[in-house]
Amino acid sequence: ESVPTHWVPKRLRFVINSNPVKSEVSDLEKDTIVSFVPMESVTDNGQMYLEQEKHIEDVYSGYTFFKDEDIVLAKITPCFENGKGAIASGLTNGIGFGTTEFHVLRASEELDNRWLYYLTKSHPFLEIGAAEMFGAGGQKRVPESYIKNFRLGIPLKQEQAQIANFLDYKTSQVDHLIRKKIAL
């Protein structure tokens, strides 16, 4: 597909930090409370339910680390194909740990994280990613290399914000209509 000529073609690896390292929070006290997010606490419409909290010492090993404003994205089938993911927000102490079945994307200064989130929900991203999955027995996963090597045209940050604002508005309208229909 063609993109506007002023959009700069790049691979995501140059504009995101993929799966940031948990050593960023290694200096915190062991009893620091953080959000704990299992797969079922993230929806395919961008919601992240933050009902669980744990001490950082209980989740530091064996779970996926993320912070407020990071995008979490399911890596396992069928959650990936369904677009299960969210922008982390309101995490306890700004820190979350969750299932190892999440990829975490942190936008660089060049990206609006909402635009990046909507990219992960786009049909081309999900369709191509599904074709890149590997594994057996219903346990297929999209590899991190797919995300890092995903090539796209990137608009200026101001234009990304405008696109994200439009998509936020459209999403809120759809959510409103769904809630209205459910109430009937």
Image (cartoon, rainbow, N blue to C red):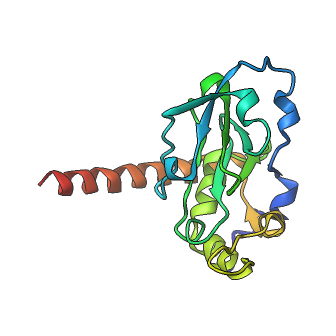
Nearer to me, 57 or 96: 57
What is the x, y in percent for residue 69?
66, 38
181 displayed left or right of 40: left
Q: Is residue 150 above or below residue 87?
A: below
Nearer to me, 167 or 92: 92
What residue do we see at 70% from left, 19% from top?
Answer: 32
What residue do we see at 63% from left, 61% from top?
Answer: 120
What is the x, y in percent for residue 184?
11, 55
Residue 133's quadrant in the figure?
bottom right
79 displayed left or right of 107: left
What is the x, y in percent for residue 183?
15, 51
What residue do we see at 80% from left, 63% from top?
Answer: 144
User: Can residue 173 be seen at all in this image of the molecule?
Assistant: yes
The quarter in which the N terminus is drawn is bottom right
183 displayed left or right of 151: left
Q: Is residue 4 above or below residue 104?
A: below
What is the x, y in percent for residue 173?
33, 52
Residue 151's quadrant in the figure?
bottom right
- Residue found at the very far left of the displayed protein: 184
